[in-house]
Amino acid sequence: MMSTRREVLLFACLGVLTVFVTGPVTPATESAVADSGPERVLELAFEIASAIENDPKDREKAQYFVAYDLAQTGDLALARRYAEKISGWRKGVALAEFARDAARQGKKELARELIREARRVEAVTRGWQRPRIAAYIATAEAELGDAEGAKEVLVRLAEEDSQYLGRAVAASAAALVRRGEIEQALAELDTLADSRDIYDTWWRTMGLIDIAGNEELPEKTRDLAARRALESTATIAGWKRVEALLALAPIFRQMGRTPQVQEVLDRALERVQGIPPTSPVRTRLMGRLARALGRAGRREEAIDLLERAHGLCARTMKVERPGILAALAAVNHDLGRRRQARALFIEALDAAAELVNGRPRALAAVAICGELGRHAIGADAEILARLQALRAGLKAPW
């Protein structure tokens, strides 16, 4: 399928396509009605990722992100097919992550099959990447209810690298939840309560958030876990605290806890202001926070935050701008601001085309495709043509 469509992309009109990269932009339409759906855009993203010639690490990372984005659309089967084409160790990570997703969806046989495939990648991997794959496999096995096995693997890894200890506890708690042993799961997470290690605080908080988000559990249990998670976010250092708060906000919203939603978002707003304005992390988090504000009914604040984030883009590194602009475009689309979204996608494509070297241009194009695909936006004819032109124009210098 990919090879056939790739031939279509490299057609006789390369000169015309180049105009889309460097020439004038047609007037923006009110909505970016997709001529090509999310799957087509992500297929193109994988082609672009695979075209990176001189840097296997960046190629594999970009391929992994595309497979992950496909999984976010809900199509695990397609995501798996793309993951199997990743040439490096990230293939094992992707397969293990999809195994976890399959387990959460109740597809236990598929989860076990994906775990077996991930193990095959682990077996031929050397260096620090091998324990990384093993950690993801253990997390997937925890979702199947294997508390003891998952924790044993991760504790063994933690003997060599402390970052795995918190993950071990969170994985064990997840397995206990799957077995209906909720009190034991909460007690397991509480073993990390006094730690201030950056990994331990993160995994305890995310373990509590995972319990709070489990709609199969009693409301009282979920409420307890959510309140503990909110308290736990205060122990997370730096910008990762904002990420945890953004993960917690939709759970409070789903539970109908409006005051807690607003408290979480206010805390995130305060925290994000402390991140240096030149950091791409700040701009991206501002975009995600704007999405959360919009969904919580704070539309005007969301739009103001988006506009401020857009203003900061010029202060970030050029190689980061296309992805940031595309992320902000996707948030505008989510808020129903389709005309503004399309204009920002065009601006992102302009920024990508201005990058001199092929490798950063390819990574920028993958990031733009990811936003179009992951958020089910797709691409209209002009946007798709410009992405195709970026693909066709990849060449040295890389």
Image (cartoon, rainbow, N blue to C red):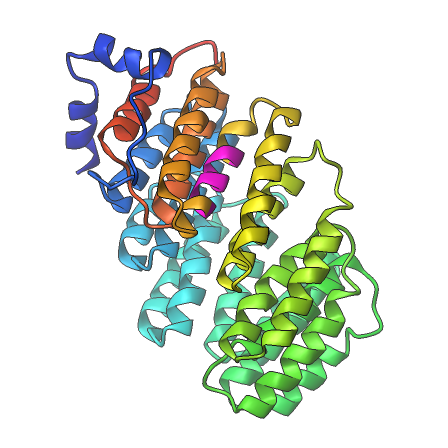
Residue 194 place in picture, x, y as percent: 85, 73
Residue, far front: 300
Residue 233 counted in the magenta span:
no
Residue 127 seen in the figure = yes
Residue 152 seen in the figure = no
Residue 212 place in picture, x, y as percent: 57, 78
Relative to residue 339, is residue 166 depicted above or below? below
Q: Is residue 390 left or right of residue 57?
A: left
Residue 388 place in picture, x, y as percent: 28, 24
Q: Work out which quarter of the rendered image holds the N terminus and state it.
A: top left
Instruction: Choose between 288 and 193: the one closer to the eye.
Output: 288
Q: What is the quadrant of residue 279 in the picture?
A: top right
Instruction: Choose between 290 and 204: the one closer to the eye.
Output: 290
Residue drawn 25% across and 24% down? 385
Residue drawn 57% across and 74% down? 252
Magenta span dominant secondary structure? helix
Residue drawn 49% across and 61% down? 295
Relative to residue 370, is residue 182 depicted above or below? below
Question: What's drawn in magenta, residue-wise?
Answer: 324-331
